[in-house]
Image (cartoon, rainbow, N blue to C red):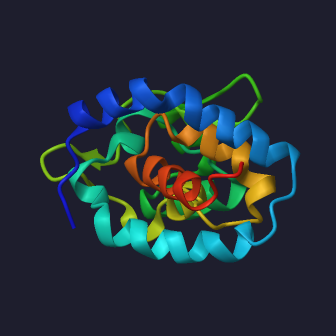
Amino acid sequence: MQSTNLRSFKRKLSYHRKSFRSFLNKTEKITIRGIDKLTPEIEKEVWQEVDCLSCANCCKKMTPTFTDQDLKRISAHFNQTPEEFRKQWLEKDKNKDWVNKQQPCQFLNLKDNKCSIYAIRPADCAGFPHLSKKRWKEYAHVHKQNIDYCPATYSMVEKMMARLPQV
């Protein structure tokens, strides 16, 4: 597993973003036989190559959506009510979802890129980057967003494109 160089990642992303988005747009519109069986295979390869702790770009540049269950669990950890927790840390976004007020995430330790509430983190964080969460076609739009921030998603799409050159 290699350490992630964010400068190099951003350079590669700027060069390949257009072709990756084009591929993802196509995979949203057409059904590709075998893609859902290929996804978990490629995901295993990706996690052998990508070290999230050397990156944490998701925690630095994105925010999770906090569900009601997340709010109850995390606020209890801090001996707060969900309302107190929301008031201190969260705001509503354009979709009326609860998200972090600040970036990077207030729970990210910038010295080691570890989450200070990892055991009770939001469900959105626990599932990120959602590489094989659902059928590919249903999640291609999420991958389209995540390639801009996540080297694992970038690698997943890159490998998928190499294995499906007909798309």
Q: Visible in this render: residue 65?
A: no
Q: Is residue 120 left or right of residue 50?
A: right
Depicted 94 relative to depicted 165: above or below: above
Q: Position of residue 23 (x, y in %)?
A: 66, 40
Residue found at the far front of this picture: 166
**Residue occupying image coordinates x 56% and y 63%:** 127
Q: Quadrant of the N terminus?
A: bottom left
- Please say if 39 is above or below 165: below
Can residue 103 be seen in this snapshot? yes
Identify the residue at horizontal 31%, vertical 47% (top origin).
Answer: 56
Say if 143 sits above or below 123 in the image: above
In the rendered view, would you say 167 is above or below 18?
Answer: below
- Left or right: where does residue 113 sit relative to residue 129? left
Q: Of 155 and 133, which appears nearest the observer?
A: 155
| Residue furthest to the right | 30
Depth order, front residue of 132/71: 132
Q: Please report the residue visible at 46 percent of the width from the left and 46 percent of the height from the top.
A: 154
| Residue 135 picture location, percent across and down | 77, 65
Judge by depth and name the residue closer to the eye, 14 or 5. Answer: 14
Q: How many marks?
A: 0
Horizontal and vertical percent for residue 79? 45, 58
Residue 40 found in image quarter: bottom right
Q: Position of residue 117 (x, y in %)?
A: 37, 60
